[in-house]
Image (cartoon, helix red, strand yellow):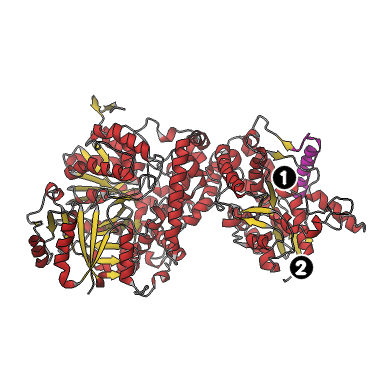
């Protein structure tokens, strides 16, 4: 007997007391708690900014036509001399970053881990923002790049549009279903890399980007 | 206030009956003062949690059967112990389901609905928080885990204590942390029990209270034992004994002695 | 401490130098029972201070973030319901998970026990020509003792979570589910890093202080090379989504992202109870878990991946579904609720026993209240330590209150105590005492007789208190005074009162 058959057999004999009903019909889940209006707070974006900043990330409000130059400024402010931009990033981002004297690195051909490690920063778009938890979710579409890009460099400049910010986790999960349906990976980011492993005190800055700068595009 | 018409059965609990008789005396005095008719059925013994919580379910069954036999006919069953009342309400149905017949299960289910801790009976059934008590002392209240999390008496003891004339109530730091008694835990894991009890004692001493009050004499036996061994000068006292006392207990008689009555020490 | 020489016996005796720091030599299963371990740990002042500080910090933080969600109790109920539904149809969901993962390009393995799971990892790693793996913190791999199995196979397993790194470099064992090095304070961490880091890779920077930020920085530098060069990574998973074939890893430091993203091959060891039916179910658990574990609104990083993604991350993805005793737990109708556990560790942080004794006394990778109910179910109750674990609790119930999936830990503890009694009912003083006691409490007149004895004792015992005496009573009397029993029980007093009432005597009327 294969291990699979053995395990399934033991599960079935362990569950002999369970009535034979379809899984989906068994044990009702009360989802009522999630039925809050999408605008549970009057100041959705204000809450988002406050909660992201709670993690010691930097948040800047940006108007749409200033996004490219503000990206370049953010990279410069944090001392990055090179930055990787995903293939799907708008051309204006490339131009503005290059114009600021920052070396633009692209992932074509695919960058080695070492090359990525030597790059000062990364600029990505994002998929969803969650106000209640101060979270940004990437689904690694073309304007965000593969997962390693937003991980290895020490500075992450992340652009999020105001219409991408939702109030809470259930709303975010509903929006992200589309990305899951196409089997895109998701990375949920809440502030810069951190640890609570020493005396359960939170300190920022371990393996992921130690600086997270969020540009919130107010449309 | 609404006094029940039927007789209230006093479930003293075995530990109170044998080691802390002043507590059931105080309950009796208090309930009669409030107009209740109280009986103490002599067949009563124990809730059986000493057996249940040590894993001896079969040995707990005589207590379960005896409990329904003893108290089944009464309108209310009231006991001065969040822990023992909690055991009746939480564990008797489980034991009856596992080891009893359907008849016993029905009897247990019926009795669970009318078995109350003293603080619940006072606040919910009689509808009183000011029971006319007088206790001119500084006290701190230990909530006891089973009162808090099994019987779920909530803030009823606080409501009752706050209405006591002359009483000063000081909040106990880390009030919701276990004192480390835990029934046979204190014997099976004596070192951990004492470590927990020592921290509880320290919290009690930090309040500067004269009395440590609780709704369970079992926890008081443990914390009180530590307080006494360390000559702390803090006196453990059951909630019922405070609620039973009135100003009359403190009136100095002509010969200089204070009056003595059942509820006072 | 230097890398020790070990002998691996195969066809011929191969002597090789250990690649990774050796854990302490004690085997968990041979440990003495809990009270004995507890006594030792209670005397460790440093441990007591470290644990009190850490658990108090996290408890206070948890209360704050939980109070932020007005529907917290509804969330707990939903979490419980989803997990129950999954467990009641686990075979269905596991088959769905396997099909989804396979469709997503992952390779699914099934392992009956630790040995099978370890061998699968060894075989895959060898097939890649790798002699080391980087690891994301995972309770499942701790449970199956993967690191030592790999070490014996000549493969170095590098822990990359900061706390796991501290434990590994410290030749130590984890003592907490979430923060395995909770028993260490910052100055101890500094000493471990100074002593050991250089032996196993990049040494700590000059002038390393005990500043946690600087210690975290040292770990970043130490591990960076290992991440960049690793060919194979091993992870666990917090959740495995059946309908989409998605695995989820919840973490803080980014070491998880490194392991899950950079190597070519990823092997995830997943306990079969980690399954969730749908992606939508995550909306519940992504609220419950971070607030219950690190007491944050959200943990810094969560990775979700569905098999192989072309051009992004590992191009060979393995998932090992592990039983290792879980089906035994599932068969116990009371005990199976332990399988709802999402390993948040809120029960450890709130537990007054854990706070004072620490994790090592439990003799299991799962310490604290959840360990006390999970370990004896996974391993059985044959050993002394496993028999004593269900008793390692005062039944205060604080763990049940904080559990995000509403595992009634006290209920299961009492149930397992009964199981220990039923399975080991040889003659014992406890058994005899309980038998006699049970009989006595069956009738009021029997208890009344016992009380007469207590009254008599009270009457003849000199003094007010029963002081310290040798023998079994010393467990109580060693530290606590005990008042002698009163000479009149309530029962006798009541009988007298009733008699007096009947005879019209008003002497006791004021009572």
Is residue C408 something one can see in this rendering? no
Q: Looking at the image, which is closer to me, C195 or C160?
A: C195
Q: What residue sits right under mark 1 in the picture?
A: C440
Residue B6, label in figure:
2
Q: What stretch is highlighted in magenta?
A: C440-464
Q: Looking at the image, which is closer to me, B37 or B240?
A: B240
Q: Look at the magenta stretch and give its main secondary structure.
A: helix
Residue drawn 81% across the image and 38% down it: C459
Say if the magenta span includes residue C453: yes
For this view, does A217 lie left or right of residue B38?
Answer: left
Look at the numbered disc 2 and give the secondary structure of its residue.
Answer: loop
Badge 1: chain ID? C
Residue B185, label in figure:
none
Residue C321 is situated, as x and y percent measured from the top left of the image, at: 31, 50
For this view, does A121 lie left or right of residue C278?
Answer: left
Crowd tier of the residue under label 2, counting other residues whose Cα lies within 10 Å: few below 14, some 14–19, many 20 or above: few
Looking at the figure, which quarter contains the N terminus of chain B? bottom right
Whether tag 1 and tag 2 are in contact, CB under 8 A, the answer is no
Badge 2: chain ID? B
Say if the magenta span includes residue A134: no
């Amino acid at each position: 007997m294969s291990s699979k058959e053995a395990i399934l057999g033991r599960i079935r004999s362990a569950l002999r007391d369970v009535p034979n009903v379809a899984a989906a019909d068994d044990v009702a889940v009360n989802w009522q708690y999630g039925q809050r209006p999408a605008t549970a707070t009057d100041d959705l974006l204000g809450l988002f900014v406050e909660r992201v900043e709670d993690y010691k990330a930097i948040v800047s409000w940006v108007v749409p036509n200033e996004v490219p130059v503000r990206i370049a400024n953010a990279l410069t402010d944090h001392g990055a001399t090179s930055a990787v931009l995903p293939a799907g990033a708008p051309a204006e981002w490339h131009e503005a970053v290059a114009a600021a004297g920052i070396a633009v690195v692209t992932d074509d051909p695919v960058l080695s881990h070492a090359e990525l490690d030597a790059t000062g920063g990364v600029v990505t778009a994002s998929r969803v923002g969650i106000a209640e938890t101060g979270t940004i979710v990437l689904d690694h579409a073309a304007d965000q790049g593969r997962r390693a890009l937003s991980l290895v460099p020490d500075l992450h400049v992340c652009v999020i549009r105001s219409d991408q910010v939702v109030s809470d986790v259930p709303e975010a999960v509903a929006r992200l279903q589309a990305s899951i349906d196409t089997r895109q990976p998701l990375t949920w980011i809440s502030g810069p890399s951190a640890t609570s492993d020493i005396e359960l005190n939170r300190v920022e800055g371990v393996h992921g980007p130690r600086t997270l700068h969020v540009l919130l595009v107010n449309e | 206030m609404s006094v029940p018409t039927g007789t209230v059965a006093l479930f003293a609990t075995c530990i109170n009956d044998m080691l802390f008789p002043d507590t059931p005396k105080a309950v009796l005095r208090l309930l009669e003062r409030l107009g209740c008719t109280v009986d103490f059925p002599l067949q009563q013994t124990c809730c059986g949690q000493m057996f249940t919580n040590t894993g001896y379910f079969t040995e707990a069954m005589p207590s379960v059967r005896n409990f329904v036999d003893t108290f089944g006919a009464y309108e209310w069953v009231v006991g001065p112990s969040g822990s023992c009342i909690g055991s009746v309400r939480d564990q008797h149905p489980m034991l009856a389901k596992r080891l009893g017949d359907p008849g016993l299960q029905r009897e247990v289910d019926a009795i669970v609905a009318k078995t109350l801790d003293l603080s619940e009976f006072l606040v919910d059934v009689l509808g009183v928080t000011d029971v006319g008590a007088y206790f001119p002392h500084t006290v701190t209240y230990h909530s006891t885990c089973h009162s808090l999390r099994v019987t779920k008496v909530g803030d009823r003891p606080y409501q009752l204590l706050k209405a006591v004339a002359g009483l000063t109530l000081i909040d106990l730091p880390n009030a919701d942390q276990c004192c480390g008694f835990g029934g046979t835990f204190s014997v099976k894991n004596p070192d951990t029990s004492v470590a927990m009890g020592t921290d509880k004692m320290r919290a009690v001493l930090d309040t500067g209270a004269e009395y440590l009050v609780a709704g369970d004499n079992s926890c008081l036996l443990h914390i009180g034992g530590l307080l006494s061994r360390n000559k702390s000068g803090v006196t453990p006292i059951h909630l019922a004994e405070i609620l039973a006392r009135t100003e009359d207990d403190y009136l100095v008689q002509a010969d200089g002695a204070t009056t003595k009555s059942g509820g006072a020490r | 401490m230097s890398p020790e020489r070990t002998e691996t016996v195969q066809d011929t005796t191969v002597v090789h130098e250990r690649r990774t720091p050796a854990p302490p030599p004690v085997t968990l299963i041979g440990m003495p029972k809990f009270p004995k371990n507890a006594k030792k740990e209670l005397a460790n002042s440093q441990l007591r201070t470290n644990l009190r500080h850490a658990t108090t910090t996290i408890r206070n933080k948890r209360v704050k973030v939980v109070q932020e969600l007005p529907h917290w109790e509804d969330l707990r109920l939903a979490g419980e319901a989803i997990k129950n539904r999954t467990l009641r149809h686990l075979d269905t969901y596991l088959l769905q998970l396997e099909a989804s993962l396979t469709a997503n390009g992952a390779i699914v393995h099934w392992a009956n026990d630790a040995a099978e799971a370890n061998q699968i990892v060894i075989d895959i790693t060898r097939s890649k020509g790798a002699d080391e793996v980087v690891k994301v913190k995972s309770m499942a791999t701790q449970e199956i003792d993967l690191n030592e199995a790999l070490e014996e196979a000549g493969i170095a397993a590098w822990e990359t979570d900061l706390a796991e790194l501290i434990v590994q470099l410290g030749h130590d064992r984890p003592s907490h589910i979430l923060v395995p090095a909770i028993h260490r304070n910052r100055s101890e961490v500094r000493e471990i890093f100074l002593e050991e880091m250089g032996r196993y890779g990049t040494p700590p920077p000059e002038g390393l202080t005990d500043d946690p930020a600087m210690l975290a920085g040292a770990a970043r530098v130490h591990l960076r090379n290992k991440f960049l060069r690793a060919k194979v990574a091993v992870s666990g998973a917090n959740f495995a989504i059946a309908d989409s074939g998605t695995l989820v890893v919840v973490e803080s430091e980014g070491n998880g992202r490194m392991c899950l993203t950079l190597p070519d091959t990823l092997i995830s060891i997943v306990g079969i109870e980690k399954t969730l039916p749908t992606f939508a179910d995550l909306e519940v658990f992504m609220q419950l878990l971070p607030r219950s574990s690190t007491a944050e609104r959200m943990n810094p990083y969560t990775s979700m991946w569905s098999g192989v993604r072309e051009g992004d991350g590992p191009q060979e993805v393995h998932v090992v579904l592990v039983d290792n005793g879980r089906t035994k737990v599932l068969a116990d109708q009371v005990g199976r609720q332990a399988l709802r556990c999402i390993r948040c560790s809120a029960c450890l942080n709130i537990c007054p026993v854990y706070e004072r004794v620490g994790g090592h006394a439990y003799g299991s990778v799962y310490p604290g209240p959840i360990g006390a109910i999970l370990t004896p179910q996974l391993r059985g109750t044959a050993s002394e330590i496993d028999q004593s674990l269900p008793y390692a609790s005062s039944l205060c119930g604080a763990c049940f209150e904080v559990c995000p999936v509403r595992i009634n830990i006290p209920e299961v503890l009492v149930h397992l105590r009964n199981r220990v009694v039923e399975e080991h009912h040889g003659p014992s003083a406890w058994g005899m005492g309980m038998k006699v006691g049970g009989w006595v409490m069956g009738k009021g007149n029997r208890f009344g007789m016992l009380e007469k004895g207590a009254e008599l004792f009270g009457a003849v015992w000199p003094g007010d208190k029963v002081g310290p005496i040798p023998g079994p009573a010393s467990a109580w009397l060693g530290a606590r005074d005990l008042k002698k029993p009163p000479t009149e029980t309530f029962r006798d007093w009541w009988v007298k009162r009733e008699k007096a009432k009947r005879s019209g005597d008003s002497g006791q009327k004021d009572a």
